[in-house]
Amino acid sequence: MAVLNKIRQRSLFLILIIALALFAFVLADLFKNSDALTAKSQNVIATVNGKEITREDFLQKVEIAQRQAGPSTTSTQIMNRVWDQEVRQAIMETQFEELGITVEKDQMRDLLRTSLASSPEFLNEAGLFDENKMNEYIANLKETNPAGFSSWVNYEKQIAANALNQNYYNMVKAGLTGTLAEGELEHKLEGNKVDLKYVQIAYSTISDSLVKVSKSDISDYINEHKTQFEVEASRDIRFVEFKEEASVEDENGIKAELNRYKNGQLVDENGRKNEIPAFAQATDNEDYINSVAASDLKFDDSFVFRGSLPSDYADDIFNLNEGEVFGPYKDNGFFKISKVIAVKQIPDSAKVRHILIPHLGAQSAGPEVTKTEDQAKVLADSLLNVLESDSSKFPEYVTEYSSDQGSVNNGGRYDWHAYGSMVPEFNDFEFNGQVGDLGVVKTVFGFHIIEIEGLKDSKRAVQVGTIARRIEPSEATTDKIFRDASNFEINAGEGDFEAVAKENKLTVRPVNGIKALDESIPGVGNQRPIVRWAFEEQVDAGDIKRFNIPGGYVIAQVVAKNEAGLMSVDNATARVLPILRKEKKAEMIKDRVSATTLEDIAAAENTTVKSATGVNMKNPTISGAGREPYVVGAAFGLNEGETSGLLEGEKGVYAVLVTKATPAVELENYQAAANRVEQQKTAVVNSRLYSALKEAAEIEDNRAQAQIQ
C-alpha cells in the first residue's frame, strides 16, 4: 500500500516520463527514416521548378499510356516516356505562368475549327465547318458516352498545350534579331582572310609510352573541371549466363517425332499401339495439324507465293505436287514438316478503292467516332446498296464518310499493291474476287466498302500446311542447366567469381555505370530486377545473386558501388588520359624547340614548311592540318610578315607566319548579313530551346526512392 501511495503522489511525474519516452521513440523512428516526416519520396516522385508530380497522377498516366502502346513496349519504357512528357509540361507551364500566356475561349474555338475543318461530322451542307454541329456532338458525347467525352476533353487539352507551346516558341523567335553590328561581325569573320606559312610538329611524333600521366594528374584534372565529371550514383556488375537451350539429343527427339507424322505410325515410342495416318494422307488438314499433331503453329489457309516461304527451303516446298510433304527442316526456332495442300493461280497485284466506316472500339478510331458496330454496319450496307446501282457516287461518299486519311485524297483508291499488303480480310476479298466486284468487308479498322478496279500478273501460289515443333530443351536438359547454375552460384559465393567462371568455361560479362532507373542489361535485355537488386542498400560489392531470365538464368555479382558526385579516377581515365598526354606532349615539344624561324624549326624537327591561303575565322580550318580554331585565331592577331611563337593546337604544336592579310570588303549596309544572323538564331530555337530550359530548371527526381520502377 505504501508503494501505491507513493505512485499516486508522483503520478504527474510518471506521466511526463512516459510521454517523453514515447516522444523520443517516435522522433528516433522519424530521424531513422526521414522520409516519414513528409512522405515526399513516396507520394511525390518529382518536383520541377516547384511543381510537384504526384505518384498517383503519374502512375495513372503510365497506365493509360501502357494501354495505348500495347504489350510490345515495356513498363520502364512507358514510365520514362511519361516522365519526359511530365517534366516537359512542368517546365513549359512555368514559362507560360511567368509570361501570363493562356489559351482563351475564342482562341480555343479557332483552334478546334482549324483542327476539325475536314471532319465530315462537323460540316454543313456547303462543306464548311459548323460550330453548332460540334457543340451538339460534344453535348451528346457528354450525355451518352463518358469515356468518349473524357477522350474529347484530353483532345482539347492537347490542342491547347500545342498552341501554348507554339505561342511561346514564336515569342522567343520574335525576340531574336540580328543587329547591324552582328551583321558586320559576321561579314568580317567570313570575309577577313589571311594567307600563311606554318610548321606543324604533330603530337604523334612523341610515343605515348614516353609520356607519364599519374593518377594524381588525372585526379587534379577532374577537380579542376568538376562540372564535366559530375555523375549519378551507379553500379558496376559482372555476370555469367546459363541458357536453357535444346541439346543435340533434344533436337533429334523433335525430328523423330515429326517423322512419325510424316511417315505414319503404328506404335508410339512406349510400344503402345497408337495408329496415326501419314500427313500426306490426311484429308482434313486443319484438324490434322491443329488437333492430331497439335502443331505449335496453327493452320493458315492462305495461299502464298514462293517469296513468302522460308528462304532456305523455298524451292523444296514450292515445287512439291499437291499432297507431297517436305521435311523435317529447321526454320526460325522450329523444326517443321510442310505439305502442299492446294495450288492455284493468284494475281500478284491489285488496284482497289474503298470507303472505311469506323465504329467505337475499332483500331485507329478517333475521338470523333460515335457509331456503334451495328450502326456502322447499317451505314456501310446502305451505301453499298446505292453504289451497286450508281457507282459514280463513290468519290462523293469517300469524301463524306471514309475515315481512311491515307486514301481519301486519292478518291479512296489504293493503286497497284502486292498480295498480302492489306489486312487478311481485305486481302482475301480483293485477290479472290473479280474486277468490278463490290462488297462490304469487316476488318479491325471497321467496315470497308471495296470495289476491285484491277487485277494483274496471275502466278502460281500454294496453300501450305505445316506441322511445327518449337525447338525447346527437354525436362532433363532444363534440370541440368538449373543444377549447373545453382552450383556456380554456390561456388562463386565461396570463391573467386572470375576463377570459378573460367573453371566452368563460362564467359564473364562486365557491365559498368548502371544507373538506378536503367532497365536494360547488355546481352540479356530488359532486366529491371537485376538493377533494383544492385541498388538495394544492404547489397555490397562482392554480393552474388541468381536471377531467372527468359530462357535461362543469370548469376550476377556487384563489383563496385559508385556514389553520386565526381567520377572516379579509374572511370575518368579513358577521357582524361588523351587530354593530359596532349598537354604534356605540347610542353615537351615547346621545351625542345629553340629555333625562331619556320625554316629552322622545320629543319630541327625533320618536317617541312607548309602554306595555306584564304583562311578565315568563320571556318577556322588550315589546309593540310585540319580544324585548328586556336591557331587560326592567333594568326589573325599577327601583322603581315610577323611570326608567332609556338601555339598548342588540336593535332600538334604550330609556328605561323602571316604572309598576307586581306580585309573583308566594306559594305554600305550590313542589313543582309544581319538578316542571316537572325535566321541562324531562329533556326536553332526548335532544337535547343527546351534543352536550355531543362538545363536551367530545378528538377528533383525521386523515382528511385519512390520505387515506381
Image (cartoon, grey):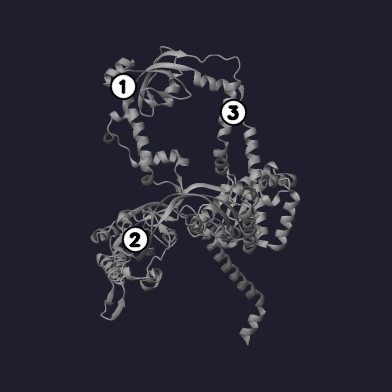
Q: Choose between 281 and 444: the one closer to the eye.
A: 281
Give the labeled residue for mark 2.
333
Q: How crowded is mark 3: few (under 14 residues within 10 Å), some or many (20 or more)?
A: many
Residue 268 in sight from this viewpoint: no
Which mark is first along the chain, 2 or 3?
2
Give the labeled residue for mark 3.
678
Q: Which amino acid does label 1 sit on?
A: Val
User: What's the CA distance linking mark 3 and mark 2?
Assistant: 58 Å
Image position of 295 (left or right of 445): left
Q: Please provide percent x and percent y for residue 630.
A: 43, 25
Q: Among all residues in the image, which is located at the extreme bottom?
A: 1
Give the labeled residue for mark 1.
593
For the image shown, how many numbered marks are present on the structure?
3
Q: Residues within 10 Å of mark 2 (few under 14, many from 20)?
A: few
Q: Residues within 10 Å of mark 1 (few under 14, many from 20)?
A: few
> Which of the 4 quarters of the picture holds residue 559?
bottom left
Q: What residue type is labelled 2?
A: Gly
Asked if marks 2 and 1 touch (Cβ < 8 Å), the reply is: no
